[in-house]
Amino acid sequence: MKYGYFDDHAREYVITRPDTPLPWINYLGSEGFFSLISNTCGGYSFYKDAKLRRITRFRYNDVPQDCGGRCFWICDGDSVWSPAFLPAKTPLDLYKCRHGLGYSVFESSKDKVEAELTVTVPKGCDIELQKLTLRNAGGEKKRLTIYAAAEFCLWNAVDDSTNYQRNWNIGEVEIEGSTVYHKTEYRERRNHYAFYSVNAPIAGYDTDRDTFLGKFNGWGEAAAVRERTSFMSRASGWAPIAALRLEAELGPGEEKTYVFALGYVENEEDKKFSSPGIINKDKAHAMLEAFSTAERFDAAVAELREYWSGLLSRFSIRSGDERLDRMVNIWNQYQCMVTFNMSRSASYYESGTGRGMGFRDSCQDLLGFVHLIPERARERIIDIASIQFEDGSTYHQYQPLTKRGNGDIGSGFNDDPLWLVACTCAYIRETGDFSILEEPTPFNNEAGTETPLIEHLRRSLDFTMTHLGPHGLPLIGRADWNDCLNLNCFSKTPGESFQTCSNFESGKAESVFIAGMFVKYGTEYAELAERLGLGGEAEKLRGAVRDMEAAVLRFGWDGEWFRRAYDAFSRPIGSRENDEGKIFIEPQGFCVMAGIGGAEYGRRALASAEEYLGNEFGLELLSPCYSEYREYLGEISSYPPGYKENGSVFCHNNPWVTLAYCKIKDGEGAWRLYTRSAPAFIEDRSEIHRTEPYCYSQTIAGRMAQNYGEAKNSWLTGTAAWSFAAVSRGILGIRPEYDGLTVDPCIPACIEGFKVSRLFRGTRYEITVRRGNDKGLTVNGTRVEGNTIPMTDAPVCMAELVI
Ligand code: BGC
Ligand code: NOJ
């Protein structure tokens, strides 16, 4: 069952009913100011850091769900309705939510009044704009009372929801014309404020939440709205809000447009006040002026569309399969940009108060956005490498505001360093910018420790080579990619974090997965070193890679598939010797991608993965699921069977297997797996899948779960980047290489051929892939050996590959 449809031409997903199985959200903003917005206008805004600069409130785990985001009410006679359905909950005659790239539009109507509400964050300005157009579609004059409200968060989202003895005292506002200023704490250490405004004279306001709502009421029953009045309340402590009231008269056919604005401003120290205690509002005035008319709003939306057209034109395909095209051309790339902006911080599942930027997460995300924003990818790589320690190990996370390593979670995730090699090589292949390797980069952000970035890569690889266990396989440390496989942890204390507990008993547990990574990325580094004329270094590394391959084939192969690990007692994990958790997905994906054992081992490993892990939504992480908690395994066995790391389809690692299929040239296998979890391909099962059909989720409950097929944790997942890598580099086979763009598709029989338009190092490549007898690559009309289009300076390059 579907709850909407894709409008590919507009690059929108159109939701046709408010009661989606879960809130279906969108992201607004691409620089400093960000907003989450659901299909009923829920969500919140923040400036740069979802924990430290939260602008509006949101209550995770609230009842009812998703209330109190952006609140609009239209009072028409006795009826009160909301253009996005919530908070009024009045059934609408028409409801549509169109989530587009950086904006969302709500179209609704009730009793012959039509509303169109467009919400966006324009480029270059720290403001959320909400344009509301009301039209009288009837034959009678309409007298409408309109309310719009926002509830301010007292800046630090954690403090805001915990430290009530203090924060029920600090709320303060200023009111000027149609603008409410949220000036809480502005008088002391802060130089920033927020505001909510509308570009028309207001008939009244409220700024104290409890006065506006009235006793015992939620947002759906606000007293002021019910009484069609404003109490003109002035917040003093408690919960400051901005509730604006407008009165409008619309003759038949007449329409009126308002632009509401929620803005954030920082003032210079010496320009904080316009008079004692009064905020200097110059910047807010200028921002409001810049978007004071519907035309200016429309121009901002047009600019945003241009921006997205520019970004997405860097890679687009025409394949004849509209679901594939919409994933590749629009939604998968859009999600990659969202993960670039948000990392794992703010979604409807990530509270914005927990995790900083993950080392491994950020490195992997980069694989999905490097072709879109190469300059920012460069900066990101340096930020990430700067939290590495001199021995090659690294902090697991850093804070986006300070860019410092996060001491609370510390280090010890032994896969982390290798991801730096992965993303740096990908960056150079995309851009040809070898100079990044020379960039002075500190260790642990300490001034004076700067060394060229390439030294960081060396230390990453060295770290793996110098931390091998009894089988010659890499030591796992706290955990590898699978944060929940905590083989050295032995946690017995309820509530203790598996990520930070210190109970290392032997420290000798080993990871076959990291071994696969080392073979893959060690080889990539060796190729890079050869290009740089570092032959000796390359040779040494190739030797270490060969040893690692041998160790995997000797101790990491279980007969039918790759093992997962060795535990702290050197017993195999992910082996037929185990009673549960006999086979894991991660090493099948990575070891086959790395080419360990060649196509022969690859075919067997992938056939086993399909046989034991396959369900209709993809491949489960492991099988059989752990049915009880086992101390020597850690968090993985703390989840009920079929959920999360304990045997769900953990979407992130499915594209590894898709790429593994491509590695062994099995186009049917790659396609079968890709299409099983790609959101657009399972749109018609939305009532089971439940999360948004236009983005990937982290996890889809496995066969052992009660709610088999139900997805969770949408948006902020490495699945976005890896899925894009799998489809673009694997299935379509468009791969940036040092010497040019390679075209090496691995497509199923059902795809006849396709066309790609790809911007690569300043040249636009127009590539056609088709089936035929005259096999081979032709570039600008000339036959070329092999599969790589040689580098060119020309603005456009035409290529055709016949397969
Ligand atoms: C989750 C993992 C996550 C880890 C670290 C665990 O509870 O299951 O998916 O990586 O927390 O945040
Ligand atoms: C989510 C985390 O963000 C990621 O770093 C980890 O690899 C996966 N969970 C698997 O545990």
Image: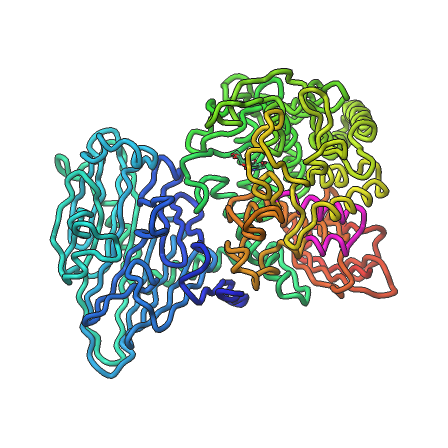
Location of residue 442 in the rendering, given as x and y in whole percent from the top left corner: 54, 22
Q: Is residue 208 above or below residue 309?
A: above
Q: Is residue 791 visible?
A: no
State the extent of the magenta-drawn residues as a range: 650-673
Residue sitting at the far bottom: 139
Q: Residue at x 67, y 36 (%)?
A: 425
Q: Is residue 646 above or below residue 687?
A: above
Nearer to us in this view, 541 or 361: 361
Q: Is residue 544 visible?
A: yes
Q: Residue at x 15, y 49 (%)?
A: 211
Residue 245 drawn in magenta: no
The answer to whether residue 216 is left or right of residue 126 is left
Image quadrant of residue 635?
Answer: top right
Image quadrant of residue 143?
Answer: bottom left
Residue sitting at the far right: 773
Ligand 2 - quadrant of the structure image:
top right
Location of residue 113 in the rendering, given as x and y in whole percent from the top left corner: 28, 74
Q: Is residue 791 above or below residue 414?
A: below
Location of residue 778 in the rendering, given as x and y in whole percent from the top left corner: 81, 59
Residue 663 drawn in magenta: yes
Nearer to us in this view, 636 or 349: 636
